[in-house]
Image (cartoon, rainbow, N blue to C red):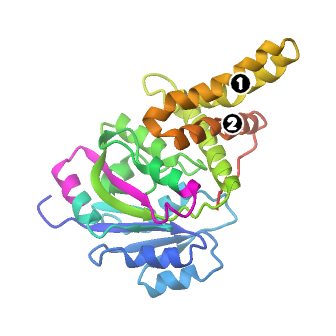
Amino acid sequence: MTSAPRIAAVLIGRNEGARLIAALAAIPPDVSPVIYVDSGSTDGSVAAAQAAGARVVRLDMTRPFTAARARNEGFAALSPDTADFVQFIDGDCALDSSWITTATTFLQANPTAAIACGRRRERFPEASIWNRLCDEEWDTPIGKALACGGDALIRASAFKAVGGYNPSLIAGEEPELCVRLRAAGWEIWRLDAEMTLHDANMTRFGQWWKRMRRSGHAFAEGAALHGAPPERHFVRETKSAVLWGAVLPLLALLGAAVTPWALLLWLALPLQVLRLAPRFGLTRALFLTVGKIPEAIGVIEYWFRRLIRRRAGLIEYK
């Protein structure tokens, strides 16, 4: 690439309020155009985005909504060949001031890299244990990766070549996109750099539980799409959720009707916590283990809906 790269941004949101304003304000002035895709906001988000100079795309809410569909429509709103790289951002996130320069430099120097992502942090990790768990979850290994999250700088040509996100997925659309990119010979990289601040705004146990249910659904659907060898996408995660969150509790409950010794099966859960604690810390190990139950529910929900041929709706924790 001999000339300065052209960088655009696609930001999606619904009723994000002040978070959206902060997200728009954090986009560098040399990133243009900025596309804001709104999914039925009623809080003035559209006006706020327009006031910030963003081009607004309003989704037709009579059709099933997914974040994947919103991102695709934002990308489609870009004029053909007007961007070399596109920064996708969720409306509850704000870019670090140095991220675009860092990520663009990396993608220019690595022509086989389709995606560069960095460290996403929670804005208020101290606000709740659920926010803190999110912040720890975002801290993933540096280097060549299998997948990215919702915030990422993506090479426009690669994104277009594989057809963008799968708009039917209600969750797990980013790892699924990365599966197809890697199959096409592209690489995904996680850089040792600050990328975004995220506001999970989780203050209740029920929000965390629903978020874990959504993860289980994503695991099951991802495995159904790409679970065959050699990819085995989300197969291990799906099996783990079913084993720890459904099979083990069911065997313990049913076995107790036959022999009280079956109650010893429950000891596997605290033993699993102790096994994970040296790697993740005791608190996160506990919730990783307990979280297998809502994950298993999400897996079961996916397969039940698939069996009755009924489309799943969004599982939103906010």
Q: Report the residue marked by disc 1.
A: 266
Going by the numbered disc 1, the residue's amino acid type is Trp
Q: Is 185 in front, or is 67?
A: 67
**Magenta-drawn segment:** 104-131
Residue 90 against residue 264 in the figure, above or below: below
Residue positioned 27% across, 61% down in the render: 84
| Label 1 to label 2: alpha-carbon separation | 13 Å
Residue positioned 83% across, 20% down in the render: 254
Mark 1 residue element: helix
Going by the numbered disc 2, the residue's amino acid type is Ile
Q: Position of residue 88 (x, y in %)?
A: 41, 61
The mark total stands at 2
Q: Report the residue marked by disc 2.
A: 293
Q: Is 22 in front, or is 137?
A: 137
Residue positioned 52% across, 70% down in the render: 37
Q: Quadrant of the C terminus?
A: bottom right
In screen coordinates, is 197 left or right of 248? left
Whether residue 210 is visible: yes
In screen coordinates, is 7 left or right of 64? left
Mark 1 or 2, which is nearer the eye?
Answer: 1
Mark 2 residue element: helix
Q: Is 231 in front, or is 317?
A: 317
- Residue 302 quadrant: top right
Q: Position of residue 258 (x, y in %)?
A: 87, 12
